[in-house]
Amino acid sequence: MSLLAWIIVFTLIGGVLSVACAALLLLVPEDHHPRILPHGVSFALGALLSVAFLDLLPDALTTAGSAHTESLFATVLIGILGFFLLEKLLIWRHCHADHCETHSGDHFHQPAGTLIVVGDAIHNFVDGILIAAAFLTDINLGIITSLAVAAHEIPQEVGDFAILLQSGYGRGKALAYNLLSSLATMVGGILAYFSLEHIHGWLPYILALAASSFIYIAVADLIPSLHQKTTARAAFQQIALIAAGVLVIYWAHAQTEIASHIEEPTSGPILYTPKSH
């Protein structure tokens, strides 16, 4: 099997496997959603912030180097403002179409679901680049990296499903959008195979942009929705589930780091040492 075929197969595995595992949430009967989904949103808040601050931004800083710190944080700032404008446009369009019913009840407005799909697609695109870079270094390392990425994505995808369902998306549409965003992993892998040396300089900024989307969703959409529950019991449940989201992502990130070093070449980071193809 050619190296490109390895990359295509395992970027699909890395993207689709995590969505398939997280899709078990869709098996929960709809009449249980009002009780379960708010807990999923709390978990999603911890997971999204952890992915942004423990995974994406540290990787961006490491890849770019300290000389680019200011420009990376400027990218995060621009990304947050850009997602604010995008959400404004989506809300404006939706309100004109549906008489502004997007803010009713305990549901998020649908643009929050749209933003989570966009942010996840950016993240998956970067994962595809990293998987391809690992395969260009060593096939065994590529396989390990693909499986580690899939494991790392599962808790985040669970949170994504919770957000989409809470935003009013049906099960089929939530699954379709998550599967569609997972295909960005394969797109990133194929692009990296043909032009890794050209896109490497953009990687830190793509990571920073993905981080800005998760930070914006967490701060602008998830936290305000959690503040609607004001009882002490609800607050303790939210804090516990947010902490669980943080800890699960931290553990998954640690396992990914361990896996990435099992067969990592001693000559340098993966992205700096691709083999010719």
Image (cartoon, grey):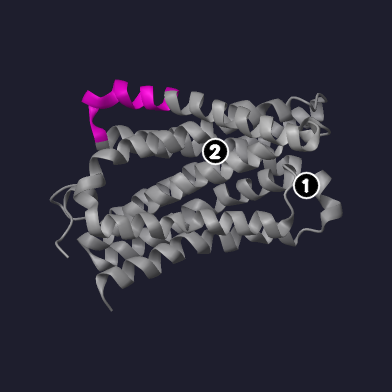
| Pointer 1 or 2: first along the chain | 1
In the picture, residue 140 is in which quadrant?
bottom left
The percent position of residue 75, horizontal first and vertical second, equals 38, 27
Task: Locate residue 239: give its quadrant.
Answer: top right
Q: Amino acid at mark 2?
A: Leu
Which portion, as a residue range, is magenta? 64-77
> Which mark is on residue 254?
none
70 displayed left or right of 32: left
Q: Position of residue 121 (x, y in %)?
A: 48, 48
Label 1, on which residue?
Answer: 36
Q: Which residue is found at the position 56% from the left and 26% from the top?
A: 84
Taking the spot 80% from the left edge, 30% from the top edge, the residue there is 233
Between 163 and 102, the one lying in front of the other is 102
**Distance Cα–Cα, label 1 vs label 2:** 18 Å
Query: Residue extending furthest bottom?
Result: 1
Q: In the figure, is residue 39 to the left or right of 90?
A: right
Count residues near mark 2 (Cα–Cα under 10 Å), then give few for <14, some for 14-19, many for 20+.
Answer: many
